Image: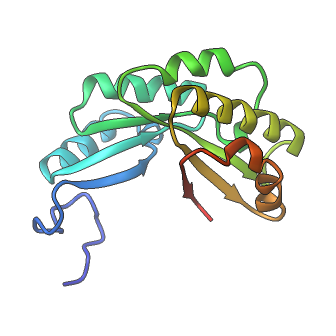
Amino acid sequence: MPMARDSTQTWHHERVTPWYDTHVHLDRYAEPERGVLLQRASASGVVLIAVATNLHSSVGVIALLKSHEAVAGGVVGVHPKDARESFEQQLTLMASHPGIVGIGECGFDADGPAVSLQSETFLAQCRIAHRLDLPLVLHIDGDGAWDSFVEHEAAFASLRVVRHYF
């Protein structure tokens, strides 16, 4: 049976229960479209893990955890294209919220800002993941991104990681 194009439909026919979407950026949808997506996911038995890309969307992920039963977990963090300084304390507080299951989407992107800033951002998120015993959700894309990631092996060596977008 071919998979339906709209993966929020009940196409899995109870083959897998529950069905998890482990990487959804719900912040990219405005209300009421986001509400419709969440209702369809819930009705279809799909459990969502909402993933942030910056501090603003991290706040949104936490709000979704409080308000929608279809969102079973959240990942808060700073995407490499949004790399920045001075966020570690704020993100640590967000990551301590009940329902947060990971740190990210973090890593390296050839189209992002300077590698030095991406490195600083990545290392801060590794420290948070270590302190809170959370996995990293990685984004590694473009020329040199993998090499930049590997250069920081000591920072993530003992962490659990989920690689996204390669």
| Residue 85 in the image, given as x and y percentages of width and height | 79, 24
160, 56: nearer the viewer: 160
Q: Is residue 23 left or right of residue 103?
A: left
- Residue 48: x %, y % from top left: 31, 45
**Can you give x and y, in whole percent of width and height, for residue 154 in the image?**
76, 45
Q: Is residue 73 above or below residue 156?
A: above
- The quadrant in which residue 55 appears is top right
Give the residue furthest to the front: 158
In the rendered image, the quadrant that contains the N terminus is bottom left
Q: What colouring style does the render use?
A: rainbow
Residue at the spot 83% in from the left edge and 42% down from the top edge: 113
Rendered residue at 58%/38% (across/down): 53
- Judged left or right of residue 111, residue 140 is left
Identify the residue at image location x=84%, y=61%: 144
Residue 159, by quadrant, is top right
**x then y, percent, for residue 162:** 52, 53
